[in-house]
Image (tube, coloured by chain):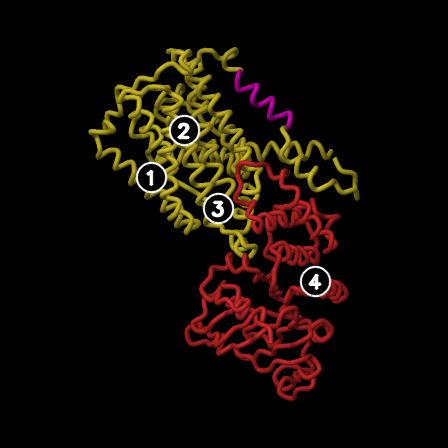
Chain colours: A yellow, B red
Amino acid sequence: MALAGKIESPQLYLRAQTRWRPIEIVFWLATLSPYVLFPNYLSLASQIAVAALFALSLDLILGYAGIVSLGHAAYFGVGAYTAGLVSKYGWGEPLSGLALAALAAGIVGYATSFVICRFRHLALIMLTTGFGLLLAELANTAGWLTGGMDGLQGIHTWKVLGYFHLDLYGSTAYGYALAVLFVLFLFARRVIHSPFGLSLRGIRENLVRMPAIGAPSRAHIRTIYTIAATLAGVAGAILAQTTETVSLDSLGFERSAEVVVMLVLGGAGRLYGGLVGAAVFMIARDQFSGIQPQYWYFWIGILLVAVVIFLPNGILGGLARLTARWSRS
Amino acid sequence: MSTPALATRGLAKNFGSLVVARDIAIELPKGVRYALIGPNGAGKTTLINLITGMLRPDAGQILLDDADITTLPPDQRVRRGLVRTYQINSLFPHLTALESVTLAVCERTRAAQIWWRELPAYRHEIDEAYQILTTLTLASVCHRPTRELAYGQQRLLEIALALATRPKVLLLDEPAAGVPREESSELFAAIAGLSDDITVLFIEHDMELVFRFATRVIVMVGGRVLLEGPPHEIATDPQVRAVYLGRAGEPRHEPHHG
């Protein structure tokens, strides 16, 4: 901490902002705990890791650049179907499958970003929703390719790194999903702490002011939208590879809405918000649907309303406020 | 005669039947300190919006260093050195002063397009931002979020953001708006201390500041330029006195929405 009146050197100060905090290291160590504590829940854990990556990708555009999307599952779905199709037609190597899925989702994201960057607020929500519905219906119509309502069958994923077999208990699946999540989290963290990341925060804070400091805001928005779509595609691909099936709901409206809920639960614009939100959402769903299989959305609804009313910046925002109060007293 | 830093020719703009700019032709030579004065609603801010591309003119031309920039988008005008500040603070509330100015410097050097290297690696950009904040006496608060800064400090940060883009022509829309009298002359001293390479046009209602800091004055009335000349001529011109200065008894510090 800087003493009152003494100013830290600007570089040291900014360096300190990017440094790893102890709580982050604890967080990532804790992600390994399911292997020891909940070995029966590794399949759920791997689905949480997929949801976390998906929510992280949404955080990059929603939390950092203020782009509200209700159609983000479009890119998740493109990634899932790409990975699924590549495997179905004979190439089941998972890592190269991920790369191809990322490429496909990135291309679709880049193409749509040219429209996205021109709109804000309600128009943007409608646009992303419309685009998501459009793609879902296309997948439904193209049953010869996607399997339509029956889902894409016949996917076979080879051993991860040629060694780890995808077993029934999900231990490889979770390790695989977690490793990819961690690597892409490092990537996202780097993006956020780059000069470009600072520009994104500028866009979120005051979009109108950006041209007056010479910033090409639309180009910035196109870049981050493409990056976010790529990460979403990877999340979809992991799901396809680990479950060896792709269904239409992978790019449905419900998935788009759920990922927004996860991010809002955890806290947008905090990098970890999506990860925490995904874990809370998926665990709550698992537990509630065990108690009341038909009404579990009721409980999710209550959870969401409670968080928005009492923790407007999500669970992490609430925790940050608590620790700030605690360290002051 | 050398080419003017900034010139407009026949600039016009209507909002429906309301004429906000008619046939505006101005020429700002390099390095001058121009004041733009006129009663409320004279079209001063509109002129700045037209010149910087925030508004599209219905007719006319804008020339920056003899190049036609009439159709360029605002951010590209900034890149060419035509920069403005705002009458009402328009800042980045949750960024610190240092982050805000560093952002503006990074946009200029195009470092802001780099997403694969960490910000602290950009020492030159950060140092330059800190340097600008130091000259504007903001170094001691540079790690505070903008929304926590005092009002006068936020006014200075507006100017710091503009300087970070290395302007050739700087348009200041009431830089001292809302700042107490004693502080506003400090603020203008900072503006007067800017490099002679920078051409400055400022809107200001306080005539004492105008006559102290402007080398030339443009008077606008009803969307057109009434007069242009050195301060002592403007001060004694009967026309100007009639439309603007002559309205004695009007309080000087009423809120303006020029």
SS at mark 3 in the image = helix
Q: Amino acid at mark 2?
A: Val
Closer to viewer: mark 3 or mark 1 = 3
Discs 2, 3: same chain: yes
Q: Looking at the image, is mark 2 or mark 1 earlier in the sequence?
A: 1
Residue that carries the numbered disc 1 in the rendered image: A132
Residue B119 vs A39, above or below: the answer is: below
Q: Chain of mark 4?
A: B
Q: Chain of mark 2?
A: A
Residue B97: which disc? none
- Observer able to see residue A311: no
Residue at x 65% of width, y 58% of height? B159
State the CA–CA distance, disc 4 to disc 3: 31 Å
B82 relative position to A152: left or right: right
| Of residues A179 and A42, the one drawn nearer to the viewer in this rendering | A179
Task: Looking at this view, name the residue that lies furthest to the left.
Answer: A144
Amino acid type of the residue that numbered disc 1 sits on in the rendered structure? Gly
Residue A267 position, x and y percent, is 53, 35
Q: Which residues are magenta?
A: A21-32
**Can you tell which of label 2 and label 1 is closer to the viewer?**
2
The Cα atoms of the two marked residues, 3 and 1, are separated by 22 Å
Q: Identify the secondary structure beneath mark 2.
A: helix
Q: Residues within 10 Å of mark 3 (few under 14, many from 20)?
A: some
Q: Which residue is mark 3?
A: A220
Q: In the figure, is residue A76 to the left or right of A16?
A: left
Mark 4 neighbour density, 10 Å: few (under 14) some (14–19) many (20 or more)? some
In front: A92, or B240?
A92
Magenta region, main secondary structure: helix
On the image, numbered disc 2 is attached to which residue? A234
Between marks 4 and 1, how big is the CA–CA gap? 52 Å
Residue designated by label 4: B194
Horizontal and vertical percent for residue A313?
A: 55, 38
